[in-house]
C-alpha cells in the first residue's frame, strides 16, 4: 500500500487534495508543498486514507489548527487528531495575567 495524492477542483472552486492509502512521515513534505502551492489554500480529502504514522497525525492536527479543512476524515483519525490537539493545548498553557 502506498500514498497517492490527487488534485481536484471542488464544486466551490477550491482545490481539493485527495490523500489515499498509507501516509508516512516521508510524505508530509510533499503534502506541505502541494498545500503551499495553492494561493487560496487547499482542502485535504482523507476519505481513502487507510493508515498513518503518528507524525502524520501531528501534521494533520497542525494543518487543521492553521485553517486547512480536513474533509471526509475517518472516525479513527478524527479521534486521534482531537487527542493530539488536546495534548498540544495542555503541553503549552496560555499565559494568564495577574491582577
Image (tube, rainbow, N blue to C red):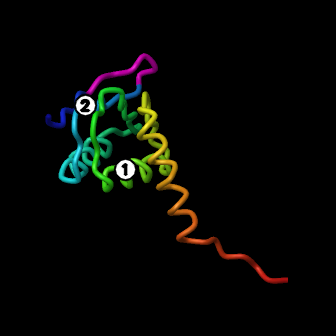
Distance, label 2 to label 1, CA atoms, is: 15 Å
**Which part of the image, by quadrant, shows the C terminus?**
bottom right
Q: Which residue is mark 2?
A: 20
Say which of 90 and 18 sits in front: 90
**Which structural element holds mark 2?**
strand
**Which part of the image, by quadrant, shows the N terminus?**
top left
Is 82 located above or below residue 13 in the figure?
Answer: below
Residue that protrudes farthest toward the front in the picture: 76
Residue 97 lies left or right of residue 41; in this view the side is: right
Q: Which residue is mark 1?
A: 57
Q: Residues within 10 Å of mark 1 (few under 14, many from 20)?
A: many
Say which of 72 and 6 sits in front: 72
Residue that protrudes farthest toward the top in the picture: 11
**Which structural element holds mark 1?**
helix
Q: Position of residue 12 (x, y in %)?
A: 46, 20
Q: Position of residue 35 (x, y in %)?
A: 32, 42
Say which of 3 and 8 sits in front: 3
Instruction: Answer whether residue 8 is magenta in the image.
Output: yes
Give, as a single range, the part of the protein colored magenta.
7-13
Instruction: Answer whether residue 44 is magenta in the image.
Output: no
Amino acid at each position: 500500500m502506498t500514498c497517492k495524492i490527487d488534485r481536484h477542483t471542488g464544486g466551490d472552486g477550491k482545490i481539493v487534495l485527495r490523500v489515499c492509502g498509507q501516509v508516512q512521515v516521508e510524505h508530509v513534505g510533499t503534502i506541505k508543498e502541494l498545500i503551499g502551492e495553492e494561493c487560496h489554500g487547499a482542502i485535504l480529502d482523507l476519505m481513502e486514507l487507510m493508515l498513518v504514522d503518528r507524525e502524520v497525525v501531528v501534521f494533520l492536527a497542525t494543518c487543521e489548527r492553521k485553517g486547512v479543512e480536513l474533509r471526509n476524515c475517518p472516525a479513527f483519525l478524527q479521534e486521534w487528531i482531537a487527542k493530539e490537539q488536546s495534548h498540544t493545548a495542555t503541553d503549552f498553557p496560555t499565559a494568564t495575567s495577574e491582577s
